[in-house]
Image (spheres, rainbow, N blue to C red):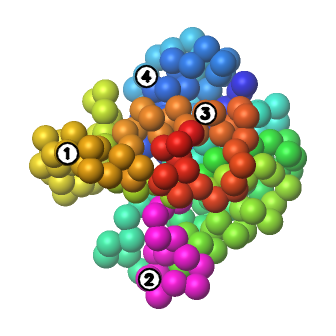
Amino acid sequence: MKVIVFGATGMIGQGVLRECLLDPEVEGVLVIGRTPTGQRHGKLREIRHDDFTDFSPIAGEFAGQDACLFCLGVSSLGMSEQDYRRVTYDYTIAAARTLAEQNPGSAFVYISGAGTDSAGRSMWARVKGETENALLALPLKAYMLRPGYIQPTHGTRSKTSWYRLAYAVMRPLYPVLRRLFPRYVITTDELGRAMIAIAEHGAQKHVLEASDINAL
């Protein structure tokens, strides 16, 4: 399987990229991003691209890819709806449309979020929900993942300083959370393996909540 990974320098993307490079069923990984991952691997190829609303200059790179693992995202904290929509909706749909044009029927696995609701009151939940709906309307095998609490592992770390602080505080408590809420907490490596499994074999649902992801 050949996969494209977006958001490979973020916390979730770092974990997903790690699992892709370790998985023998993944023969090639194409990372598209603005900044390099800093990794070197025989399966890994990176393309720098700045305009995430227009992938036409590199559209040919999407051809022949079996799946896209889309981990790119930002916190809505302190962002206007217009700016948040640009990153969350516009970037995602631009990538998905390019993949659909170049390789219709391939898999698009999207990291959404618990509580996503296109009719919700929260701005982030509404924009995420609209993004999910747009993805499901494309000629792709699209899957929406709504994980709960995600614990970074194997050196993966958030780009956001206060997130890093929060995860550092929560790290000693993770075994307790895992014991009390096993269906709703997951590690970055487990999430990466779940995304690869969905990309390769599909899933019974197109919208997977935290318990569905953990069951996978």
Quarter of the image with the N terminus in it: top right
Q: Amino acid at mark 1?
A: Val
Q: Which mark is residue 196?
A: 3
- The residue tagged 2 is 122
Q: Nearer the viewer, residue 52 or 22?
A: 22
Q: Secondary structure at mark 2?
A: loop
Q: Earlier in the sequence, mark 4 or mark 1?
A: 4
- The residue tagged 1 is 176
- Residue 72 image point, x, y percent: 50, 51
What residue range appears in magenta? 112-125
Task: Estimate the spatial distance between the alpha carbons at disc 2 and disc 1, rounded to whole Å.
Answer: 29 Å
Q: Amino acid at mark 3?
A: Ile
Task: Estimate the spatial distance between the alpha carbons at disc 2 and disc 3, rounded to whole Å.
Answer: 30 Å
- The residue tagged 4 is 39
Q: Amino acid at mark 2?
A: Ser
- The residue shown at (57%, 30%) is 46
Q: What predominant SS class does the magenta segment belong to?
A: loop
Q: Are there few (<14), some (14-19), or many (20+) residues within 10 Å of tag 4?
A: few
Left or right: residue 11 compared with residue 7: left
